Image: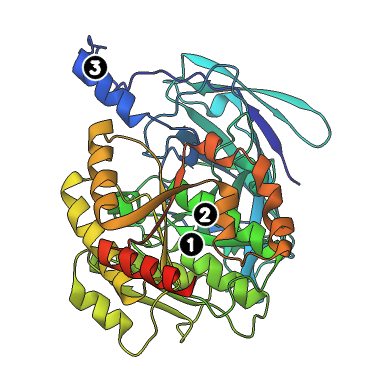
């Protein structure tokens, strides 16, 4: 049974710790905090208390704490009227290619009973849950944004070799989530879990299992991203302690949304293309493109090369294995440190140049700007027709710091701002049929809702090349 819960959460704008008094915040700290919350529009559902017990008894209630955070992991700040419906689903890997609803077991969710609420939950706001029978339940959630739920796996039998994932998802379709005026958060997926059978139903709620040094089984946190086919997902593990490469950022969400939509319009639109997912992080963009081509049985799929620093590659490879995507001539993961011509030559050896280079949310440290721009220049020199598509969401950088990057980029490369329609057009020809394929994006508010900006970066002709081009044009005339 799918349970829908509507949350009205009162979030304190200040970060408090138990035993500490609230202090006067300086103007400098206020500006710093405002910078961290800049463009924080797509929140995340995450764990309020970490779990480390991966075996669940069927027909037994378990408790879990969830909370809302920003893209940077800070307490989410939403108005008291902010609401979002949430469903609870049980996912399994199907046909070795995608995750979908379990066909053998179901999950039931409910708001935690009042006696299960800890004593520190004093200052509260109301959270309500409406199930499919329109029954109403009240619930108390703390001002630190915690929500306690209970869940139960239903079934009459279980296979200890099967793995399950619990998916807490906004009740809208994930495709429409990012368009919502209510700014529904990014879903949370937990697992893998194994089910244990028992002779009779246990009506008692199992206590929360916190981090335990003696525990052997670890419950991981994932994001379930939709594939073009409805109710089919890919799972991506996040490691928030891994820094920027260990998280799913908003620009990647925007790009994935458009790529999925274009695949529904024309599943062959990337056939034969050579694509680099530069600084790919958890691998969301590149792996989704690869898996979509695989599910569509594309005979000439795009060649995807995902790159990042050496220390970021294990997580990316883990997500590749999680989604059963084999290493092949069409999918590879390689090291690329910005500015390293050696790394680029290694990637290019024996292969043609890239048609497209995709990169999302990498502008954080100004000291890295020169190396990044040099990498752009080195890549487009391999093929002057290479198109770099960059997603960037303004966050903590000052305007002068952003200008530093874009001004230097324009010195060496051609830089254009894209809307969603022009972004989509990069992957099609200029035929009349293209207008029909991308016209629907004209009305999309995706960029406004997320704060993401898209840029096209290409080779910049120098003065000699421009003069030579003009001379040839005049001669032909």
In the image, is residue 407 above or below residue 256?
Answer: above
Marks 1 and 2 in Cβ contact (< 8 Å): yes
Q: Determine the residue positioned at 47% across, 36% down.
A: 451
Residue tagged 1: 285
Q: Which comes sooner in the sequence, label 2 or label 3?
A: 3
The secondary structure type at the circle numbered 2 is helix
Q: Determine the residue positioned at 54% across, 54% down.
A: 423
Q: Determine the residue positioned at 67% across, 40% down.
A: 443
Q: Is residue 231 left or right of residue 211?
A: right
- Label 1: how many Cα within 10 Å (few below 14, some 14–19, many 20+): many
Question: Residue 400 in the image: x percent, y percent?
Answer: 23, 33
Q: Residue furthest bottom?
A: 350
Question: Residue 24 in the image: x percent, y percent?
Answer: 22, 9
Residue tagged 3: 20
The numbered dot on residue 383 is none
Q: Is residue 108 left or right of residue 133?
A: left
Q: Which comes sooner in the sequence, label 1 or label 3?
A: 3
Residue tagged 2: 255
Question: Residue 282 in the image: x percent, y percent?
Answer: 40, 60
């Amino acid at each position: 049974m799918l349970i829908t819960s509507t949350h009205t959460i009162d979030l304190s704008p200040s970060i408090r710790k138990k035993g500490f008094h609230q202090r006067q915040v300086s103007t400098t700290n206020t500006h710093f905090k405002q910078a961290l919350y800049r463009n924080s529009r797509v929140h995340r559902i995450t764990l309020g208390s970490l779990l480390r017990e991966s075996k669940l008894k069927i027909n037994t209630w378990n408790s879990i704490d969830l909370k809302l955070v920003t893209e940077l992991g800070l307490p989410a700040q939403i108005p008291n009227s902010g609401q979002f419906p949430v469903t609870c689903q049980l996912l399994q890997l199907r046909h070795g290619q995608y995750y979908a609803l379990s066909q053998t077991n179901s999950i039931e969710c409910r708001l935690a009973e009042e006696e299960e609420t800890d004593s520190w939950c004093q200052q509260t706001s109301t959270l309500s849950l409406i199930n499919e029978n329109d029954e109403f339940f009240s619930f108390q959630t703390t001002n630190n944004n915690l929500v306690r739920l209970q869940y139960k796996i239903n079934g009459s039998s279980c296979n200890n070799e099967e793995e399950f994932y619990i998916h807490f998802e906004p009740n809208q379709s994930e495709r429409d989530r990012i368009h919502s005026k209510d700014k529904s958060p990014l879903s949370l997926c937990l697992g893998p879990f194994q089910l244990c059978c028992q002779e009779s139903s246990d009506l008692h709620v199992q206590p929360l299992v916190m981090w335990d040094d003696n525990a052997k089984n670890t419950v991981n946190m994932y994001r379930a991203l939709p594939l073009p086919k409805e109710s089919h997902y890919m799972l991506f593990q996040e490691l928030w302690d891994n820094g920027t490469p260990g998280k799913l950022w908003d620009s990647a969400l925007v790009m994935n949304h458009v790529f999925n939509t274009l695949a529904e319009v024309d599943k062959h639109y990337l056939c034969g293309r050579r694509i680099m997912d530069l600084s790919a992080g958890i691998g969301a963009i590149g792996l989704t493109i690869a898996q979509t081509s695989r599910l569509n049985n594309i005979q000439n799929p795009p060649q995807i090369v995902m790159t990042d620093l050496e220390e970021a590659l294990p997580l990316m490879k883990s997500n590749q294995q999680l989604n059963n995507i084999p290493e092949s001539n069409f999918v590879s993961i390689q090291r690329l440190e910005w500015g390293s011509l050696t790394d680029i030559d290694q990637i290019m050896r024996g292969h043609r140049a890239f048609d497209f280079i995709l990169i999302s949310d990498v502008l954080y440290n100004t000291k890295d700007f020169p190396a990044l721009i040099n990498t752009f220049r080195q890549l487009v020199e391999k093929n002057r027709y290479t198109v770099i598509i960059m997603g960037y969401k303004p966050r903590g950088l000052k305007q002068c710091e952003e200008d530093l990057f874009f001004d230097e980029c324009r010195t060496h490369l051609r830089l254009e701002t894209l809307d969603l329609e022009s972004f989509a057009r990069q992957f099609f020809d200029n035929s009349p049929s293209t207008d029909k394929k991308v016209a629907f994006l004209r009305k999309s508010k995706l960029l406004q809702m997320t704060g993401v900006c898209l840029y096209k970066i290409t080779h910049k002709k120098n003065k000699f090349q421009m003069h030579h081009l003009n001379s040839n044009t005049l001669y032909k005339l």
